Image (cartoon, helix red, strand yellow):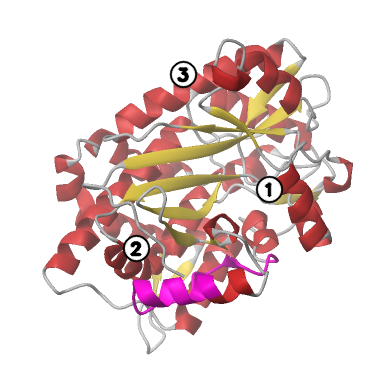
Amino acid sequence: MQIDFHASAGPSLGIEVELELVDVRTGHLASHASTILAELGTGHPDGEHPRAKHELFESCIEVITDVCSTVGEAKTDLAATIAEVREAAGRHGCTLICSGSHPYSLWGEQQISPSERYDELVEAMQWMARRLQIFGIHIHLGVRSGEKAIALGNAMATYIPHLLALSASSPFWEGHDTGLASTRSKIFEGLPTAGLPVELADWDEFEQYMTTLVHAGAITSVREVWWDIRPHPDFGTIELRMCDGMPTLYEVSAVAALAQGLIAHLDQLHDEGDLPARPREWILRENKWRAGRFGLDADLIVDDAGATKPAREAIATLVEQVRPHAEVLRCTDELAGIATMLEVGSSAARQRRISDGGKNLRAVVDLLARELSTDEIRHETRS
């Protein structure tokens, strides 16, 4: 099957943020998305807000940006929509948080959003879909052709562990500390087309991949290819899907700046014929595991001999590599936030610090709500 790639002129940016609705009294997830979205849609075409959407569960609302040129523009866009959602949620006794998983709500108690697509997903995937009480950040990066989308996606896969470690925010699952920094990443890998992206030779091979799975009835569109990095032909982007939900727009913006600078860096290397090869499958898989297990405290494998480097050091080096491109893209201020994230620690670490050894998970929810509303991160400790 032929798939047209609607090319972007340059490294444009789009961000999708999955917000959790939580009851202000109990801190549990609250299934009010349909009611809130109906209110937000008033006055908009077809009664739908252009920037706030349903997700799989009624306890989640996804907010999205328009196509943006800069990270600052995307952050302003997100902030405006989140403010609207927060105000509407407040009328129904809810507040908002953003993290890879909720600390103690149960997936079996979540209501599926009213959608034929979601009904079909649950019917097809059963338990694997029903337990997807997880929340992420997706970053779309514009690229100039389908062939570039494949080449740059292959090269970008090297940095899946870096971005996962930075965003890791799901240490708790149904009231228990899993010992992982990103429980979400392991749960999501249960879907048949999720996890590490397939390494493809070119756009023709991507079309063959899609032909095989569509004709076999495994998927109906690229929307059901849930790789950590996937080409998005309709948008003319590479979509990064490895990140856990991040509690602040400060963190979202910092990671988006790193991603946008990185795609520009790799695009230049591709034009110069110097694009680095994707790591061996076993190295990439091990590095992703280490990032999901240890977060920013991971040691990442850097060569075939098994040499390692601390994730913080590897990320700091990457920041310096992309800084010249960040200057061109006008996102150096946001990129500077990576240094703060490396110092303060991931959300997973902050959640553990305030949880009193996992005994006070309500304090974790309160922390997440406070961080989203204030857009500040700091060395939190339990009181």
Q: Is residue 39 above or below residue 327?
A: above
Name which residue type carries label 1: Ile
Q: Position of residue 106 (x, y in %)?
A: 85, 44
Whichever of labels 1 and 2 marks the residue nearer the N terminus, that label is 1
Name which residue lies at 23% across and 38% down.
332
Q: Position of residue 221 (x, y in %)?
A: 56, 59
Q: Where 151 falls versus 138 (above or below)?
A: below
Q: Is residue 262 above or below residue 367?
A: below
Most foreground residue, 54 or 5:
5
Residue 191, numbered circle: none
User: Where does label 1 land, which residue?
Assistant: 134
The local crowd at label 1, few if under 14, some if 14 to 19, many if 20 or more residues have their Cα within 10 Å, is many
Q: Does the image show residue 101?
A: yes
Q: Which residue is farthest bottom?
A: 305
Q: Nearer the viewer, mark 1 or mark 2?
A: 1
Query: Which residue is at the front of the view, 234 or 264?
Result: 234
The residue beneath circle 2 is 314
Tag nearer the camera, 2 or 3: 3
Q: Which residues are magenta?
A: 190-211
Q: Which sits earlier in the primary sequence, circle 3 or circle 1?
A: 3
Q: Secondary structure at mark 1?
A: loop
Residue on which disc 3 sits: 80
Instruction: Tell me where residue 140 appears, x and y as whole percent.
Output: 40, 47
Q: Which quadrant of the view contains residue 306? A: bottom left
